Amino acid sequence: MPPDPKKHRSWPAKFGRAFRAIVLGVRGQSSFCIHGLAAVMVVAAGVPLKVSRAEWCLLVLCITIVLAAEMFNSSLERLAAAISDDYDHQIHDALDMASAAVLIAAIGAVVVGAIVFLNRLVAIFG
């Protein structure tokens, strides 16, 4: 049974619900898995390439933004499914905009990753 939204929840309960929601958002979402794999690859590349502390901050921020955008997108998809099974052009447009937000975040992360890694890779392989 879901908790009463009017009842005050303790901080541990709030965090518990948030971690439960992370599991719900990640489970069965192939795009979330792809972004997660990309994040692991960035971390795996950053260690041997000796990324600076400031560059790590930028990379972690980009990873966080992309994963958060994907979580918002997943939550909107679930909400839309709960609202109606019928096609609605406004819901369709809203879901497309949420997907576009993930795409924009991912493109920005790729640009930051390229700025951080390209010089190092050119020095190694160039």
Image: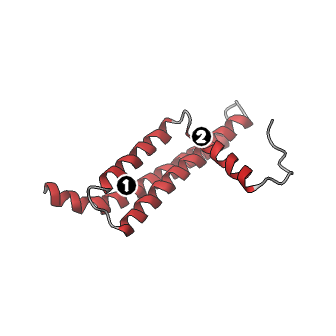
Residue 12 versus residue 75: which sits nearer the camera?
12
Q: State the SS at label 1.
A: helix
The disc placed on residue 61 is none
Image point (54%, 33%), residue name: 28
Colour scheme of the picture: secondary structure
Residue 124 image-quadrant placement: bottom left
The kind of residue on which mark 2 rests is: Val
Image point (68%, 47%), residue name: 16
Q: Is residue 13 left or right of residue 116?
A: right
Q: Quadrant of the C terminus?
A: bottom left
| Mark 2 nearby-residue class (10 Å; few <14, some 14–19, many ≥20) | few
Q: Residue 100 in the image: state x and y as whole percent.
A: 51, 49
Which residue in the protein does label 2 denote?
Answer: 23
Q: Quadrant of the N terminus?
A: top right
The kind of residue on which mark 1 rests is: Val
Image point (55%, 52%), residue name: 68
Image point (38%, 69%), residue name: 54
Q: Is residue 45 left or right of residue 59?
A: left
Residue 115 image-quadrant placement: bottom left
Q: Residue 104 in the image: state x and y as whole percent.
A: 47, 54
Residue 7 versus residue 82: which sits nearer the camera?
7
Q: State the SS at label 2.
A: helix
Q: Is residue 122 left or right of residue 7?
A: left
| Mark 1 nearby-residue class (10 Å; few <14, some 14–19, many ≥20) | some
Given the current orientation, which residue lies at the most extreme left position? 126
Vertical order, 110 against 84 (above or below) = below
Which residue in the protein does label 1 denote?
Answer: 110
From the viewer's perspective, is the residue at label 2 or at label 1 nearer? 2
Q: CA distance from mark 2 to mark 1?
A: 25 Å
